[in-house]
Amino acid sequence: MNTKYIFITGGVVSSLGKGIIAASLAKLLQARGLKVTIQKFDPYLNIDPGTLNPYEHGECYVTEDGAETDLDLGHYERFLGVHTSKANNVTTGKIYNTVITKEREGAYLGKTVQIVPHITDEIKRRMLLLGNSGKYEVILTEIGGTVGDMESQPFVEAVRQLQWELPEEDCMSIHLTLVPYLKAAKELKTKPTQHSVQMLQQCGVQPDVIICRTEHELSGDVRRKIALFCNVQPGHVIQSIDAWSIYQVPLNMHEEHLDELVVRKLHIDNYNRPELGNWCRFLDRLKSPEKEVDIALVGKYVALQDAYKSILEAFIHAGAACNCRVNIHSILSEDITEDNAPEILKGMKGILVAPGFGERGLEGKVHAIKYARVAGIPFLGICLGMQMAVVEFARDVLGYKDAASAEVNPMSPHPVIDLMEDQKSTTIKGGTMRLGAYDCQIEKGSLAYNIYGSEFISERHRHRYEFNASYAEEFEKAGLKASGHNPQTGLTEIVELPSHPFFIGVQFHPEYKSTPENPHPLFIALVKAALNA
Ligand code: GLN
């Protein structure tokens, strides 16, 4: 079978959940036994989202191979349970960077370099890259942004060309739109969908399937109307009604026969019913938990849900695994002072201090950690959260009042968190952190060992600063133990307080690897500890 390509565009408004739809369809195809991956093409000019403030574009998701990517890749991994890579996220910045570098190298032999064909050729090359690897049977490509945006035009043009170049049965196009409900008229309105599809058609792309986001059931009449005006079969107008959980969407799409019509359109001989037993069991547990627990998420980007997407999802997975609803209380770290910490954090059965960068809200994190440490509240610190746990301990237990991370106070006489050696010569900000999967060896008998049930683990990273090993002995004597290290470099990956019921800080990001079918042991352990607190 040739590799099959599915292109997904969006129209009318942004934030319709294209990533969830792409992930849901991919899940259904995977559950039918097909080898599937998803890639995202983003129309912005940054090379990657690594330099973007989370308030701009949500969390930056990190892959095994160290790519800083769009948060939709997190959805892809969580739904499919397979790793994505650098090749799965392409931006306009990356495309232009390649083309301009080639132009400087003289690769275009004196030709005028243009959007068509040079930029679109590079887009097409990248769209086919994963397909050419031979590892996948179906490649879903999500085009970021909204059809009609100036930025996304070259991507839509590349889709048009590919649909023309590839055999008809090897590719298809899906368009996601919004069908708004007008309360006053008590009516679902199809006009925005009609206009959006017209815009796509003007670019030469005829969608094979239209998926309509809606708050109310689409009647047969509404479906027929959309089909008539948009030139698709009525059965190819699919409703995506608001779901109680994003993880319910694959089942909703299956009910709408999306996977069935996709395999038919792509001439894939596959009559399997999707095998979704594990997925459904996860959903059942998620839907009717027997217990609940309150956990604080302390961070500086809490006003935007998407900024800590993977952490919030990891709690959903862990909660389901523990038969428990995890109520996350997002707390702005800037609001926390030493005096008000007990009041603000009252009733919390667990505290997670989030990753982050820079000075804002940092002291609030330190106060939250002190409260967790002294009051015996289960605590998990991730990356900057772990680093601040080290700083707090140095200040309060070792008595180094001026202990700090060199990130915010390079002049501190006690830089208990220091810049990594290989970062000292780095001046460029983009893509230069310690990124991606690294090994960690865990000390037997430690809390971490207990949690993972293994001595050797691998987790993903995104940082420039590290635990300053010259203080390790002093810390250990005073009760803060470094229980996990990188076996090659000795870098401290995990710290814990054996005298505390549950206090652990990790330099890596466990949240990136948690999935519904494989919830992360650290999150499960925190939820369990919180349930016992
Ligand atoms: N800013 C810290 C560092 O670069 C922590 C990074 C993070 O939390 N991801 O080391």
Image (cartoon, rainbow, N blue to C red):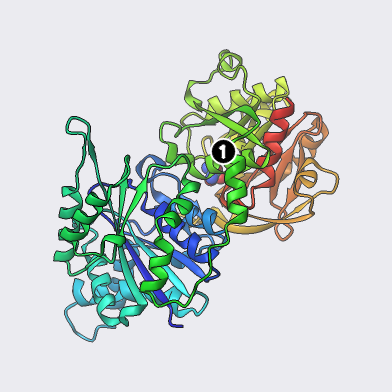
Q: Is residue 377 left or right of residue 43?
A: right
Q: Is residue 243 above or below residue 134?
A: above
Where residue 315 appears, as percent x and y from the top left, is: 59, 39
The one of 117 and 356 positioned closer to us in this rendering? 117
How many discs mark residues in the rendered view? 1
Q: Is residue 454 above or below residue 163?
A: above
Q: Can residue 296 be seen in this snapshot? A: yes
Where residue 50 appears, as percent x and y from the top left, is: 43, 52
Q: Can residue 70 be seen in this snapshot? A: no
Q: Quadrant of residue 215?
A: top left
Q: Is mark 1 within 8 Å of ligand 1?
A: no
Three-letter code, disc 1: Lys
Residue at 19 percent of width and 85 percent of height? 110
Q: Quadrant of residue 149?
A: bottom left
Of all residues, the one furthest to the bottom in this rendering is 109
Residue at 68 percent of width and 38 percent of height? 322
Q: Quadrant of residue 347?
A: top right
Q: Is residue 67 above or below residue 100?
A: above
Q: Is residue 252 left or right of residue 177?
A: right
The one of 411 and 506 positioned closer to us in this rendering? 506
Where residue 54 appears, as percent x and y from the top left, is: 41, 42
The one of 270 and 163 positioned closer to us in this rendering? 270
Which residue is tagged 1? Answer: 287
User: Which quadrant of the figure shows ligand 1?
Assistant: top right
Residue at 43 percent of width and 82 percent of height? 2
